[in-house]
Amino acid sequence: MNEIEELMKVEVNNLPPLQPMLYDDLYQNVLKNLHLELGSGPVLYLISPSYSVLNTVPSDTVMDFLNRKENLLNYLKEYIIQNLAIYTVILEMSSYFIEQNSYLVLARLMDRGGDGRKFEIKFYTHAPKELLNNYKDKIYIGRDFIDLLNFKRKYWGLKDFIISVKEQYDRLLDRAEARLKNPIEYSSFFQEIKESVNEAYNESLLILQSLPPYPELDRLSARELIDLNNQFREITHFLVELRDEVDEFENLLRYNKENDFVRYVTKYKKDLTNLISYLNIKVNGVLGHRIFTYKFKHS
């Protein structure tokens, strides 16, 4: 874990200026109560909204980072929230639990490029009063991928999510050997899910490669909008089939009391559910609106 060391190299003045964005109450409150989890060496530091370390005594490196980089941390939190608002439905899908937890959300950053620029972020929510005493009771609500130098995402960010679906399944296989009582018992489920993962991965990437990476919706004809909508809906269908198979597997694991492993399957299903909802609401939903208003404008 070296997120703090990588971020220490970043100068906030070299990052693109943030564009003003109007937030509703959910996003505004989450921004106000956003906790960061950043690694340095073997330690994952839990950092409060006021930039104090909550879970351990900070090292000199961490204290120096927090003292010198407050403007960068302010930028980073705002950047995370803007990305959540545009490219995910993570907060919307878990808004009930977030509200019950007084809008406390944890953002755990994992460096992906070694340059303090690209991060994978896992998000959790937790009851404020139990954050330190019962940290393991946090609720996983999703993951996102950010690039501090490039807010605008190709294919609305779908490629990163599709690649993650395959990567997360590979990690599930690694954990199965260590955490299942008898992994061979579930070999048929793993094989079926693997086939569905590969189909969703391969077909989705083929579809994306056939599309413009940054579609300019205002310039598309009605037929082009409809075709684009159909292509993204086809990706959704592959993901729904995969999610249903994972759901069946999760139910079996719970029935067999495979508690050491099932929580990872639950997280995987949560990622799939978030991605399907994102496609339905913020991709196909936007395209559908464009199609219907196009008809009215040109009737």
Image (tube, rainbow, N blue to C red):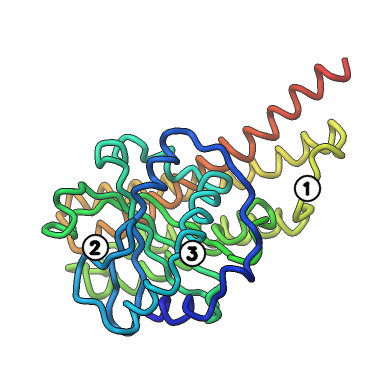
Given the image, on which type of amino acid does mark 2 rest?
A: Phe
Name above or below for residue 238 compared with residue 11: above
Inter-mark Cα distance, 2 to 1: 41 Å
Q: Quadrant of the C terminus?
A: top right
> In terms of sequence position, does the residue under pointer 3 or pointer 1 come before the other?
3
On the image, the x and y values in percent for residue 60 come to: 30, 84
Q: Quadrant of residue 190 in the image?
A: bottom left
Give the spatial CA distance, label 2 vs label 3.
40 Å
Number of the label disc, if any, that sits on residue 261: 2
Q: Are marks 2 and 3 in contact (CB under 8 Å)?
A: no
Q: In the drawing, what numbered circle is on residue 71?
A: 3
Sequence-wise first label, 2 or 3: 3
296 sits left or right of 6 in the view: right
Which mark lies nearer to you, 3 or 1? 3
Is residue 168 left or right of 177 when viewed as pictured? right
Instruction: Report the residue marked by disc 1.
Output: 215
Q: How far across and down, in percent of the image, does residue 227 sit?
A: 78, 39
What amino acid is found at the position of numbered circle 3 in the picture?
A: Asn
Residue that appears at 81% across and 24% down: 294
Identify the element where label 2 is drawn.
helix
